[in-house]
Amino acid sequence: MQYNDYQLASLKEQASGGEVYQILRRAIEELYLQPGAVLSIKDICEHFEIGRSPVRDALIRLDQEGLVTLLPQRGTMISRIDLARVEQERFLRLSVEEEVMKLFMACHTPSDITLLNEALRRQQELLDRKEVDMREFLLRDDEFHEVFYAVADKLFCLRAIQNVWGHYRRMRLLTCGTDSGLQEVIRQHSALIAAMQARDTELMRNIFLVHLRKLDREERSLLKKYPYLFKGADDRESVNPRLRADYLQTLRMEKGII
């Protein structure tokens, strides 16, 4: 399913238990649903036109993954962003990807560098648009990094990371806040390619660490600006969302975050 095709509406034909899980997980990770929002099983069942059992199964899985919190007598709350969890998910990615970068440097060919440049070009083309779709930009960012894993024959490791990065991914979306910030991402990607071509391991490592630690510089500002999105906020301030709403778009329009 492409990002442009993503909708929470009109999914009756796909609404098996597994599909409900995948759709809700994506809605959470991509900030279609606001952290702290409370959903009822009844509303979800009516929305997907499906029975309670598959919905309950999906919510139990999401609860086990830390993406929702089951609230007795109240419903299911979309878990607020846990900065301690963000740090651990980011640490996992940083630790694995640094080694993947080294493997790539040792074995890459000119055609692999071409793949990186093509991925970088797609990011720049997206940024050149009048309005940037932040989810699509993040997808292009992931595609750039996926080249390293593919060439190093470590795609299994990438999928394992992606399966547990729900809190980290939401922070990445929130920190894609300005065109200048996105342009800096592209500059860092370009510098990574140059370091790879030069087979300069130390330069590559320094650029890579700065690149993935971008969140460190912005977490405090976001926590101050949007405290209700983060773990520790009063659960009594939770909201009841419309399943068809797009929280990231609402935040963009109302707060000017991006």
Image (tube, rainbow, N blue to C red):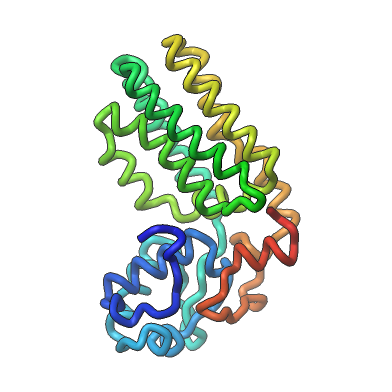
- 46 relative to 168 in the view: left or right: left
Decide if residue 231 is on the left or right side of residue 153.
Answer: right
Q: Quadrant of residue 149?
A: top left
Horizontal and vertical percent position of residue 131? 64, 53
Q: Quadrant of residue 110?
A: top left
As drawn, 181 above or below 23: above
Residue 232 visible, this orientation: no
Residue 156 seen anywhere in this rendered image of the structure: yes
Q: Residue at x 69, y 45 (%)?
A: 178
4 up-or-down from 125: above or below: below
Residue 32 screen position, x and y as percent: 53, 67
- In the image shown, does 232 or 230 lie closer to the viewer? 230
Q: How many marks?
A: 0
> Looking at the image, is 54 positioned above or below residue 222?
below
Residue at 31% in and 46% down: 160
Residue 115: percent from the left, percent from the top? 38, 29
Residue located at (48% from left, 40% from top): 141
Residue 180 rendering spot, x and y as whole percentages = 70, 38
Q: Is residue 206 left or right of residue 101?
A: right
Query: What residue is shown at x 33% (from left), y 82% (from top)?
Result: 12
Q: Is residue 243 above or below residue 220?
A: below
In this view of the protein, which residue sits in the foreground, 251 or 54? 251
Q: Nearer the viewer, residue 85 or 253?
A: 253
Q: Which quarter shows the N terminus?
A: bottom left
